[in-house]
Image (cartoon, helix red, strand yellow):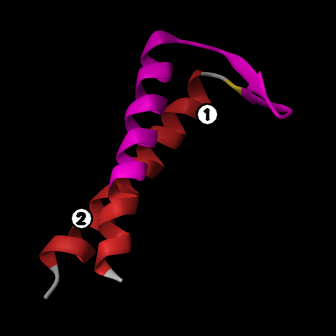
Amino acid sequence: MKEFAKFFTGVAANQALTHGALAAAGVQFSLFGISYDQRINTTSAIVWAVLVALLIYYAWGKR
């Protein structure tokens, strides 16, 4: 199970960095009917970063 957490840590980190970069650049677009603006990208970056921290704690820190 920890190996899955390690894999998804990378997926979540990718999402956090992507949404963070989109928020910093102020990029706005619509995908599948969802309008992504700076507010949604900032919120997504924070949520993904928290998930990364939790996955790191579970996969590598917790014994």
Query: In what quadrant of the picture does the N terminus appear?
Result: bottom left
- Residue at left offset 29%, top offset 79%: 2
Q: Amino acid at mark 2?
A: Ile
- Residue at left offset 26%, top offset 76%: 58
Query: In what quadrant of the picture does the C terminus appear?
Result: bottom left
Q: How many numbered marks, from 0 up?
A: 2
Indicate the position of residue 37 as horizontal and vertical percent values. 65, 22
Q: Which residue is mark 2?
A: 56
Indicate the position of residue 4 as horizontal and vertical percent values. 38, 72
Q: Is residue 25 left or right of residue 7?
A: right
Q: Which residues are magenta?
A: 10-35
Q: Which residue is mark 1?
A: 40
* In this view, the mark in front (1 or 2): 2
Disc 1 to disc 2, C-alpha distance: 24 Å
Dot 2 lies on which element? helix
- View extreme (bottom): residue: 63
Indicate the position of residue 50 as horizontal and vertical percent values. 36, 56
